[in-house]
Amino acid sequence: REELLKHADTAMYEAKNAGRGSYRFFSPEMNRQVQERLVMGAALKESLGLGHLALRYQPQIRGEDGGLHGVEALARWSHPRFGDVPPAKFIALAEETGLIEAIGEWAISEACRQMADWRARGVAIPTVSVNLSPMHFRNPKLPELVTVALESSGLSADALTLEITEGVMMDSCAGTRATVEAVAHLGVRLSLDDFGTGYSSLSSISTLPIEEIKLDRSFVRDLQNDKNARAVASAVIRIGQSLGLTVVAEGVETEPQRRFLQALDCHVMQGFLFAPALTAPDLEHWLLERAVTLSPIAHVA
Ligand code: C2E
Ligand code: CA
Ligand code: CA
């Protein structure tokens, strides 16, 4: 009987995941998936506790002069048994299990620690962007948590950018909006990630205290062969410009994509054309090498 109840529970869980008004019959495959989620969830929690999660940093390049706008911190999880688990997978798992709260705290403090280290050693990185999930903004303690991370690493608020998604805008939870405002009030920059996917409402970008929007990489990917993608990309860049927001194009992989975005005066670009997400030492190397190729002396030689 206990087994039967467990199976019913599993099917209910799956049905809930599928959305309102759906139903699911129990299948052994379902049981396997639930089992996997439990095991991986526990492993993720353990890895976080042991300090086995890491951040990689992807440079963001200014269109006008090729200078560094900032870096985006992206989480990596490498597990002895599961190998390198893609962030899309373990972040979703963390959101399901509630572990995302702790991962967000870790990411903010780890990014601040790294930023302080760069500042101390004179590595010129203007700002670090940390990804947050909508759930973080339901925590009224978020502004305090950010303040502590900044203060304990001796950073001013503009050293940190927080990337939020449209889910935050759409969140009906009462405190969310106030928390967004409070974080912005600290002087931390807010950036709206994956712009153009989701249910973007234009009113949200004009009323929320964001300073930056990130054009989703699906539009950048299709720039060359889809005129609708070109239209959306151009429109997003113009809207951003007219609202005085910085526009960051994500997933720039090719020179033609870069040229197209450049012609539209897109402020900032990020993507494999420049660099993937790198370890802190690799990013420092990359910056040094780039400084050499950009310097006038290199051209003379
Ligand atoms: P995102 O925030 O949209 O991050 C950008 C993703 O695009 C990263 O994938 C990055 O490696 C990838 N990318 C960058 N340039 C290119 C390119 O030129 N071409 C292609 N095809 N991809 C490119 P990644 O690191 O696998 O992260 C996937 C997603 O996982 C992120 O999407 C973000 O939503 C989430 N994520 C990663 N780290 C964190 C974190 O610390 N906290 C939270 N809440 N979410 C995170
Ligand atoms: Ca992001
Ligand atoms: Ca994105």
Image: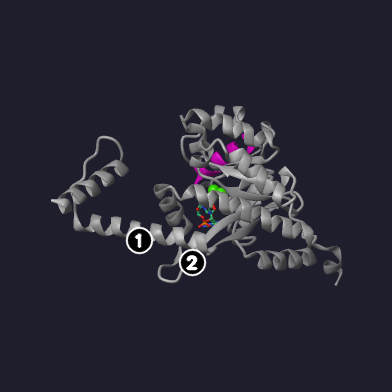
Q: Position of residue 166 (x, y in %)?
A: 51, 37
Q: Residue at the spot x=43%, y=47% of the render?
A: 98
Q: Which residue is mark 2?
A: 78
In the image: residue 151, left or right of residue 31: right
Dot 1 amino acid type:
Val
Report the colour scheme.
one colour
**Whether residue 72 is visible:** no
Q: Foreground residue, 218 or 48?
A: 48
Q: Residue at the spot x=62%, y=56% of the render?
A: 110
Find the magenta span and give its range.
226-240
Q: Foreground residue, 13 or 285?
A: 13
Q: Position of residue 155 (x, y in %)?
A: 74, 49
Q: Which residue is mark 1?
A: 39
Upstream in the sequence, badge 1 or badge 2? 1
**Whether residue 5 is visible:** yes
Dot 2 amino acid type:
Ser
In the image: residue 104, left or right of residue 20: right
Q: Residue at the spot x=62%, y=58% of the render?
A: 58
Q: Position of residue 224 (x, y in %)?
A: 54, 51
